[in-house]
Amino acid sequence: MDQPSGRSFMQVLCEKYSPENFPYRRGPGMGVHVPATPQGSPMKDRLNLPSVPVLNSCGITCAGDEKEIAAFCAHVSELDLSDNKLEDWHEVSKIVSNVPQLEFLNLSSNPLNLSVLERTCAGSFSGVRKLVLNNSKASWETVHMILQELPDLEELFLCLNDYETVSCPSICCHSLKLLHITDNNLQDWTEIRKLGVMFPSLHVLELQVAAARLV
């Protein structure tokens, strides 16, 4: 089934988590939140949004109304935006900057290599602890920028990005504990050793098809 094109994050959120498609169930532990929205909001009382919304493969290309994102996503802690059509880091930043509790973000299989990640945009990711960039073709320059602006990043996924070499940043990332970098083209141990320099506190390294535990 073909995915629609040119859809915003907010548009997809409204469609998927409307009361018709995602009925509200009362009771503890349901993980569903119906926030109070600004007076006059066209989406007042319309969304039954869990704290872990999944919006993969929805044809999302942009953020949409930032005020509405902020109103409905204040409680969201994890967000799956994999396999969409996001190619502009500015649009991703508009989403993330309005989700203040976000700790896990999956951006896999979005063509984010088509734009440059600027420091002002990267700063909006500062609270993220787990970031998935598999098959995003993110450059090492982009990875370096992310590492500089995410002081609490603990897990990073960089699989399927066609890396043949490893480029070390000027500053090491001491917070990272787990790195998945399988299914790239890294074959030289000289390059692989650079990962230890970049991430001196690494506990788990997933490289190619083997798992290495660093003590």
Image (cartoon, helix red, strand yellow):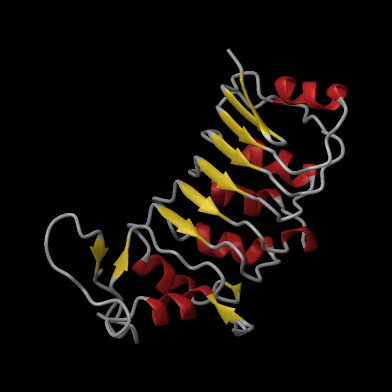
| 181 sits left or right of 151 in the view | right
Instruction: Check the picture and name the quadrant holding the N terminus.
Output: bottom right
| 144 sits left or right of 57 in the view | right
Residue in the foreground of this view, choosing between 148 and 20: 20
Which residue shows up at 55% across the image and 33% down it? 151
Residue 112 in which image quadrant: bottom right
Q: Is residue 190 visible?
A: yes
| 11 sits left or right of 118 in the view | left
Which residue shows up at 41% across the image and 74% down it? 68
| Residue at far top of view | 215
Q: What is the tally of numbered marks visible in this picture?
A: 0
| Residue at far front of view | 209
Whole-percent x, y for residue 185 in the image: 84, 41
Which residue shows up at 40% across the image and 78% down it? 16
Whole-percent x, y for residue 196 in the image: 71, 20
Is residue 90 positioned above or below 101 on the image?
below
Residue in the foreground of this view, choosing between 59 and 210: 210
Is residue 143 positioned above or below 179 on the image?
below
Instruction: Check the picture and name the quadrant holding the C terminus.
Output: top right
Whole-percent x, y for residue 210 in the image: 67, 30
Residue in the foreground of this view, choosing between 61 and 158: 158
Residue 116 in which image quadrant: bottom right
| 83 sits left or right of 208 in the view | left
Which residue shows up at 74% across the image and 44% down it? 183
Whole-percent x, y for residue 138 in the image: 75, 51
